Amino acid sequence: MNRHRTRGTVGLLIAIVLVAVAALAISACGSSTSSTTSASATPAASGSALDYAALTAAALKPFPETYMGPTTPAKAPKGIKIACITCYSILEGCVTPSKGVAEAAKAIGWQETTYDGGGTPTQQNAQILNAISKGANVIMLSSIDPKAVQSSLKAAEKAGVLIVSGSSGLSEPNPLQTYNTPPAGGVWPAFDIAPDYAALGEKGVDWMVGDAQGNFHPVIYSDKEFPSVLAVDVGLRAGFAKYNVSYPPFNYFTSTQLAVLPASVVSYLRTHPDTNYVFLPFDPAAESVVPAIANAGFNNVKLVSVLGDSVNQKFIQDGKVQAASLAYDNIYMGYAIVDQTIRLLNKQPLSQPIGENLPFVVLDKTNLPPGLGTWTTPLFDYKSEFMKLWQ
């Protein structure tokens, strides 16, 4: 894969074209860990028919339901400077984890600085070098592909800077695969905090199947550039298999094709009139696709995406094409990044699973956060739990 901060005022086309570089990392290919299996468990069927109401209710319930983060104390060292490099600071999904890091760092007396990665490897490399020159002890990459910034990461390693990551799905519970392992002789983050993206994808299928109530004809759009997206794909396929859902081959696009994605989706809907659910791999892409579907008059189509950004929450609230978004707690991500960083600085083992059971949920019009802001789990006070460990 976290999971970011406002970008509603920025031109949609610019934001969407650059989101791919930002790698909003929706990630993890492989099986779910035992701790998250229940997140996508199938509710009991009523006779031979699925209990659709139970499916949607389960998908709308955050996972986990109680705190399942670390419990081993890790006293925070003093005098640490941590730099957060966002993939692109106009993108909500790139910035919110850094806000979580900043909040946790302030609470333990660390100095945090956020740098705008600008949506390009060139700018991200420059900002990493800037952070090194400013004396950062730790550099956190927020939704940045480490393969794209190897020159600056090598400089950071040479300077003795600890490199960590969030929202890219590079660590468990997202199993390592060939597409998210370091290049030969390359430098890699010590860990990556992200949700169980495959379980999140299954949860999304639970919601769609329950919402469709037997009339489910989906089309899936995906992007092979990002491990996080590919991990969600694993969960989608597992969910479709669980319910014996027929679906067409996934439609893959790249960052260079994002500008024409709205027209591509509309064209598909015109030639496949039975399609009533469109799945997109990240919310920023949906910002232009939603108006395109609405303007084309496809009133029976529901769009589902990933991240839970505020603009997309507004679409959901207004009933404007988008009906749901798969979201995860990016503030928790920031706290978990600080927690695992403390453990490494103390030469303690990393907490397992590395993602520290980051909460996730499906958002629809029934459970949007107050004020359409950043979604955080309402079920438990994880900030207090982390603070107790760091004293």
Image (cartoon, grey):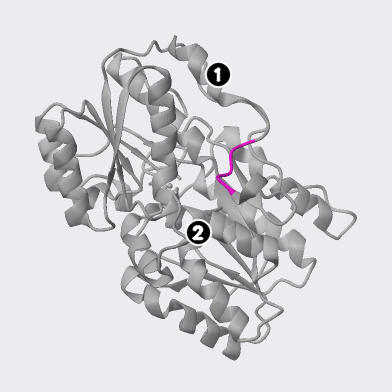
Secondary structure mostly seen in the magenta stretch? loop
Residue at x 72%, y 62% (from the top left corner): 209
Can residue 298 be seen?
Answer: yes
Give the answer, above or below, for where 389 lies relative to 122.
above
Q: Which residue is mark 1?
A: 385
Q: Which of the numbered marks, if any, corresponds to residue 287?
A: none
Could you tell me which quadrant the C terminus lies in?
top left
Count residues near mark 1 (Cα–Cα under 10 Å), then give few for <14, some for 14-19, many for 20+: some
Q: Which of the numbered marks, if any, corresponds to residue 233?
A: 2
Can residue 369 be seen?
Answer: no
Relative horizontal placement of residue 36, taking residue 215 as reference (left or right): left
Kind of residue indicated by mark 1: Glu
Label 1 vs label 2, nearer the camera:
1
Give the answer, above or below, for where 282 lies relative to 146.
below
Q: Position of residue 339 (x, y in %)?
A: 41, 23
Q: Secondary structure at mark 1?
A: helix
- Quadrant of residue 34 within the rendered picture: top right
Q: Decide whether residue 285 is among the magenta residues.
A: no
Q: Position of residue 224 (x, y in %)?
A: 37, 63
Q: Position of residue 262 (x, y in %)?
A: 48, 79
- Quadrant of residue 175 within the rendered picture: top left
Q: Position of residue 300 (x, y in %)?
A: 71, 78
Q: Residue furthest right?
A: 47
Kind of residue indicated by mark 2: Asp
Q: Secondary structure at mark 2?
A: helix
Residue at x 51%, y 67% (from the top left corner): 286
| Mark toward the start of the polypeptide (1 vs 2) | 2
Total marks shown come to 2
Count residues near mark 2 (Cα–Cα under 10 Å), then give few for <14, some for 14-19, many for 20+: many
Gap in Å between the C-alphas at discs 1 and 2? 32 Å
Q: Which residues are magenta?
A: 373-377
